[in-house]
Image (cartoon, coloured by chain):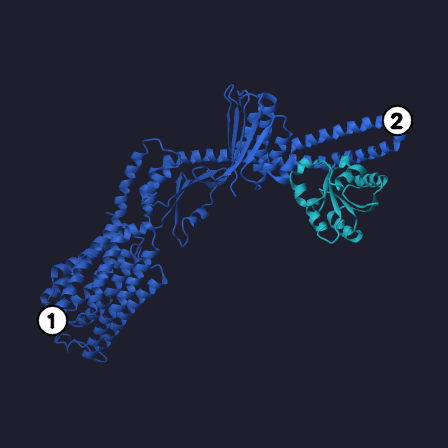
Chain colours: A cyan, B blue
């Protein structure tokens, strides 16, 4: 089954590459957002299966958005992404309620699938 | 003898003649009273008043005391059965109690302080004035047997009216004395410690006299016929006689205190500890609340003995609101040296004498305070530089994260896509794999560099988590124990982190240790960071810039830094960083 993905990241270059890479791996990219406020709005409108959520957004941190996105019925799976690695965030990743974390440079169809099945090695 | 003293001497002679003349009249009129006590009482007030006018010409207390001495003798002169003298004598003596009450309540300045005090004294004067008015309107001395009192009769001559007015005035004394004692009690409550010390004997005497006056209000008006009334009358005279002595003692006590200035000068023969000057001045002046501030010139400002900036008006305010502090500025050749913030009840002359005696010591302490202020400025400047450096580090790390790292991450994804498309071309695929591996190394190195500049986890999670992360990446096993998990101020966290980071780097590079331990604790507003290892020891902060740099960083935030590193005995690095709040 094709999984729909929303990419929330403030870097257009990264969004474009991620869209192409994940589309090539069989994911359906249903939308993009460049900040937290529009990310929440688009997630409500499109109800994606997965949200790729950047930790550092211009208006809010990804940690803060997880709760708001997960607080609705039939919530999406949320995978946090960052150019830093998981160790730079200590216990916040596990505490915030996200499904997983992927370092941006490591993003691929397979690492996303692993994160979604809880196999990702942060 | 100065002109002022000549005037006072002349005044003294005139009033003494008035007192002794009045007493002579009483003696010849066979008034049954103790003439010696009576005369001594009047003269005592006169002498006390003259001393007060001489010592404190700016205060009106001396005038009040002399006025009381004069008014007290109207009654004696009233015994002179001639012309209008009995009327004037009887009327004038009605104001004696009011003047005495005003003198006692306004001592030592002669000024009443509160509205309540003014009301009480006003009421006492009012009763005196009302009695006086009745006397002027109704007193007929011929009806009292004064054959030589030849003048137009009073408008409404009535002996019963005059007697009633005198009786009412006497009975009203109970209320007036109670009001007066209430005013004394309120003044006691509002007074400063120095005032209490100076005025306790006076107020004790006033209270005793007040009680006697209270009893007198219920005694018979006829002091000659009723033994109790006569006893009260004489008791009042004797006790009143003690008041001038207490007044004079209070005025001279400042002069006695000046002898303490001599002791102060002797104390100056030995070296003083920092801040001891204030203690000595406070002891000499008998004012434990004394504040000593020093004037610095460039820029003009006030500092305490430690060189810390102090707002003079705030110091006065801190010393107590409601005008419970005043300032005396000690200067040298017109340049202010120091400000003594002290109890306003202190004798200004004494404060000035102490300031002059301590002049050289004050200048010495002022120079020390100047040096301490400059040191404080250097330390604050160093702290600002360190904090600015930390802010710059955070900014560089953030820029790396937002710029280069993002571009490299996008590049990595782009390479991954190309690699996917080049599956059919093994050579191209291999080349792309090598490029991707090289890029991953570059990204990892850049991430490590960014982390070294400023660790994101310190900003995100605080010190214990950041230290855990450091320990996790260390090649030597590091056990971390933290007894807190709350966030601290950014500069404190940064200093604590770099102490641990540099120390663990040293453990890895030089110690040869098998294990290390980091302890983070927070007690009494101090963050204690301790890093210990079981390595070869022998670390010397004077060699190499790492430990010296840490020492400087810790000192910049007023912390303490120590290194114990005996050869072969491991190394223990300890930093204590203030983190109040």
Disc 2: which residue: B426
* Figure check: B281 above or below B73: above
* Residue occupying image coordinates x 68% and y 47%: A64
Can I make out residue B131 in this image?
yes
**x and y percent of residue B25 in the render?**
12, 65
Between B29 and B208, the one nearer to me in the picture: B208
Q: Chain of mark 1?
A: B
Could you confirm whether marks 1 and 2 are on the same chain? yes
- Most foreground residue, B550 or B470: B470
**Quick check: B501 above or below B117?**
above
Q: For mark 2, does the 10 Å Cα neighbourhood hold few (<14), some (14 to 19), or many (20 or more) residues?
A: few
Q: Closer to the N terminus: mark 1 or mark 2?
A: 1
Q: CA distance from mark 1 to mark 2?
A: 142 Å
Q: Is residue B90 left or right of residue B359?
A: left
Which residue shows up at 69% across the image and 49% down it?
A67
Q: Position of residue B287 (x, y in %)?
A: 34, 45
SS at badge 1: loop
Which is nearer the eye, A56 or B75? A56
Disc 1 residue crowd, few under 14, some 14–19, many 20+, Cα 10 Å = few
């Amino acid at each position: 089954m094709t999984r729909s993905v929303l990419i929330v990241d403030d870097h257009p270059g990264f969004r474009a590459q991620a869209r192409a890479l994940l589309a090539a791996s069989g994911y359906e990219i249903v939308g993009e957002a460049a900040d937290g406020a529009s990310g929440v709005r688009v997630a409500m409108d499109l109800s994606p299966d997965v949200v790729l959520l950047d930790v550092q957004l211009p208006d809010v941190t990804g940690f803060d958005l997880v709760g708001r996105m997960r607080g609705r019925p039939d919530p999406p799976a949320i995978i946090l992404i960052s150019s830093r690695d998981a160790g730079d965030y200590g216990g916040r990743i596990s505490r915030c309620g996200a499904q997983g974390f992927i370092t941006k440079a490591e993003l691929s169809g397979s690492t996303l699938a692993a994160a979604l099945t809880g196999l990702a090695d942060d | 003898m100065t002109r002022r003293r000549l005037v006072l001497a002349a005044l003294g002679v005139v009033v003494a003649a008035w007192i002794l003349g009045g007493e002579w009249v009483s003696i010849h009129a066979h008034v049954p009273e103790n003439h010696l006590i009576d005369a001594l009482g009047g003269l005592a007030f006169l002498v006390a008043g003259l001393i007060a006018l001489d010592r404190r010409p700016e205060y009106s207390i001396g005038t009040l005391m002399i006025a009381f001495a004069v008014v007290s003798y109207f009654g004696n002169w009233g015994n002179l059965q001639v012309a209008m003298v009995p009327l004037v004598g009887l009327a004038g003596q009605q104001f004696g109690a009011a003047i005495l009450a005003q003198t006692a309540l306004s001592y030592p300045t002669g000024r009443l302080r509160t509205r309540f005090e003014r009301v009480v004294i006003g009421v006492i004067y009012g009763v005196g004035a009302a009695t006086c008015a009745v006397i002027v309107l109704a007193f007929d001395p011929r009806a009292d047997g004064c054959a030589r009192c030849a003048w137009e009769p009073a408008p409404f001559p009535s002996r019963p009216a005059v007697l009633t007015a005198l009786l009412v005035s006497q009975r009203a004394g109970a209320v007036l004395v109670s009001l007066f004692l209430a005013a004394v009690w309120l003044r006691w409550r509002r007074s400063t410690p120095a005032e209490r010390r100076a005025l306790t004997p006076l107020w004790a005497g006033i209270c005793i006299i007040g009680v006697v006056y209270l009893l007198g209000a219920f005694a018979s008006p006829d002091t000659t016929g009723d033994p109790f009334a006569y006893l009260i009358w004489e008791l009042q005279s004797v006790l009143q006689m003690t008041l001038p002595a207490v007044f004079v003692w209070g005025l001279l006590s400042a002069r006695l205190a000046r002898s303490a200035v001599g002791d102060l000068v002797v104390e100056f023969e030995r070296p003083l500890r920092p801040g001891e000057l204030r203690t000595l001045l406070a002891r000499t002046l008998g004012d434990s609340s004394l504040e000593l501030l020093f004037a610095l010139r460039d820029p003009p400002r006030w500092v305490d003995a430690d060189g810390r900036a102090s707002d003079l008006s705030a110091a006065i305010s801190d010393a107590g609101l409601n005008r419970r502090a005043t300032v005396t500025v000690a200067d040298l050749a017109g340049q202010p040296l120091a400000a003594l913030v002290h109890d306003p009840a202190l004798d200004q002359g004494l404060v000035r004498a102490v300031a002059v005696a301590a002049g050289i010591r004050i200048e010495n302490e002022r120079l020390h305070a100047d040096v301490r202020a400059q040191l404080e400025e250097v330390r604050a400047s160093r702290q600002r530089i360190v904090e600015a450096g930390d802010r710059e580090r955070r900014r560089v790390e953030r820029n790396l994260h937002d710029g280069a790292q993002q571009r490299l991450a996008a590049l990595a994804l782009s390479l991954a896509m190309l690699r996917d498309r080049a599956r059919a071309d093994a050579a191209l695929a291999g080349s792309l794999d090598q490029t991707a591996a090289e890029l991953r190394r570059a990204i990892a190195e850049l991430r490590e560099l960014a982390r070294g500049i400023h660790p994101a986890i310190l900003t995100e999670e605080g010190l214990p988590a950041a230290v855990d992360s450091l320990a996790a990446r260390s090649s030597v096993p590091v056990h971390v124990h933290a007894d807190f998990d709350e966030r601290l101020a950014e500069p404190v966290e940064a200093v604590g982190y770099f102490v641990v980071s540099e120390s663990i780097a040293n453990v890895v590079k030089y110690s040869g240790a098998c294990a290390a331990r980091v302890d983070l604790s927070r007690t009494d507003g101090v963050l204690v960071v301790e890093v210990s290892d079981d390595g070869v020891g022998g670390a010397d902060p004077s060699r190499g810039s790492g430990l010296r740099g840490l020492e400087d960083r810790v000192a910049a935030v007023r912390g303490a830094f120590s290194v114990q590193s005996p050869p072969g005995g491991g190394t223990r690095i300890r930093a204590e960083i203030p983190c109040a709040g």
